Image: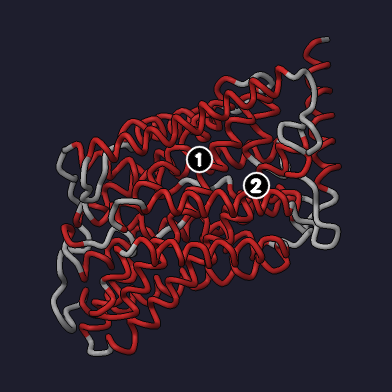
Amino acid sequence: MRGNEGEEEFLNAEHLVELQSGELKKELRLGDLVLSQVLYIMAFAWLAPAARLGSSHVIAWSPAVLLFYIPSGIVVLHLNREMPLEGGLYQWVKLRFGAAPGFLVALNLLATVVLILASEPAAVSNNLSYMAGAGGSWIIENWAYTMLLGAVLIGGLTLVTSRGLVLGRWFHNVGGSVLAILFVGMLLFALPRWIGIGPPIASAPAALAIPAMSLLNLNLIAKMGFGAFCGLDGASIFSGECRDPDSDRTVRRSIWVAGPLIALIYTVGTACVLTFTVPGQIDMTSPQTQALSMGARGVGVGELVIPLVSALAICTTIGLASLYFNVASRLPMVAGWDHLLPAWFSRLHPRFKTPVGSIVFIGVVALCLTILANLGVGGQEAFQTSLSAAIVCWALTYVVMFSIPLFAKGEKPHWGIRVAATSGLAMTVLFIALSIFPIVAVKSSASYAAKVSGIVIAINVAGALYYWRAQKRKGPLPLG
């Protein structure tokens, strides 16, 4: 009897989410989700840690794909089939583990995307320095300029996100398409050098060699696993905004199309980077711009190509930031549905049907974090600090996600899904254990580790205290 009651409660909770999702506009098609998947997961910045391993990156990418990427796809497809709901991972955890774990997962995922948003102005500054040429190096380390740029970027994205996915999806689609164009550009510059035409290659682009065993290399491999390939759950966050009533089918197809393409871009893209740069001199923020710039100079078209490449890279960054902004705005919205946040987080614009209160809140927080991340450090260190803290928060949500098939009540997955969950969980824990060690030159390794750890701990302590106080009130939060 208890089992039947539990299943009935689960189905009722699903039905309530579906009813609340009915108010949202249905804007997303399969093509939109494919390009969003590519943009959400594929980040050229991850080519830099891989290229630091030199030509042995091919061997390092293999366990990343086999032990994390494919297992995460298996688990995401399983959970989305069972619970195709707006909010994705938050809903899965809430329905299987309870409201408290669900709230903390939503908080960590929100922190992830907001921290990444805060790091995007540094990426834009880096590309603007390439566009400016030899005299543009000051742009990277000028924190005041980066913060002004951040204010313009985040302010503009706040307006775009408030308009809804009817506009936002075009930013995402352009960003994903431009990302593919940049990859093709790197490949076109690298191919002649691979067959002996033009200047010699800077370092061997690929080799079937095992990387040397060291803490740095293990750190890099862990980042190539979880860091580069997390995000297959991203499309599920918009399940309630798909045009196809069978959102599970649309999300599933987007994963099958985007998954192999992303793995190909990472592996071949790393080889392209090594074609133009030795491992010790790789730009850890924008390796794709560095590679394309050097490739263009090698054939005498640098002055023409470099500004164009930098502009395209900025387009990709803006598209990604727009996607993260939309993801971030959905998380407080769905938490508000469950009365875990004041009602104004979930209140929809009467015309655009977007959670305007949530969007404005995220914009303010992202701008504040942009300012804090750039105080007293260099551009690359600021970028890596924000990115590392963000991905650790993301990893914590994946620990819970992979735990659902293994430990959650009501779950009866096939043994293959449990094996995939175990593999993904192990790779995620390895990433967390090594994530506080920097892979770029920083002023103080101890300070860097303290910053990353402190940000993550502060977020979760604050979240736990907030939830405890909310529960202590014995009822829904005030309606704001």
Give percent across and percent down for residue 195.
Answer: 20, 77
- Residue 457 appears in the figure: yes
Q: Amino acid at mark 1?
A: Ser
**Residue 298 spot, x, y in % from top left:** 20, 83
Pick whichever, 347 or 222, lies toward us: 347
> In the image, what residue occupies the spot 42% across and 36% down?
455
Residue reaching furthest top?
1
Element type where label 1 sits in the image: helix
In the figure, is residue 288 to the left or right of 155?
Answer: left
Q: Quadrant of the N terminus?
A: top right
* Residue nearer the viewer, 462 or 166: 462
Q: Which comes sooner in the sequence, label 1 or label 2?
A: 1
Residue that carries the numbered disc 1 in the rendered image: 72
Q: Is residue 353 left or right of residue 113?
A: right
* Residue 207 to residue 166: above or below: above
The residue drawn where x is 35% and y is 54% is: 46
- Name the image quarter holding residue 453: top left
Few, some or many residues within 10 Å of mark 2 (<14, 14–19, 20+): many
- Secondary structure beneath dot 2 equals helix
Q: How many marks?
A: 2
Residue 191 seen in the figure:
no
26 to 334, vertically: above or below: below
Residue at image coords 84%, 62%: 351
Specify the quadrant that holds the C terminus.
top right
Judging by the rendered image, the residue that carries numbered circle 2 is: 236
**Which amino acid is tagged 2?**
Ser
**Residue 358 appears left or right of 120:** right
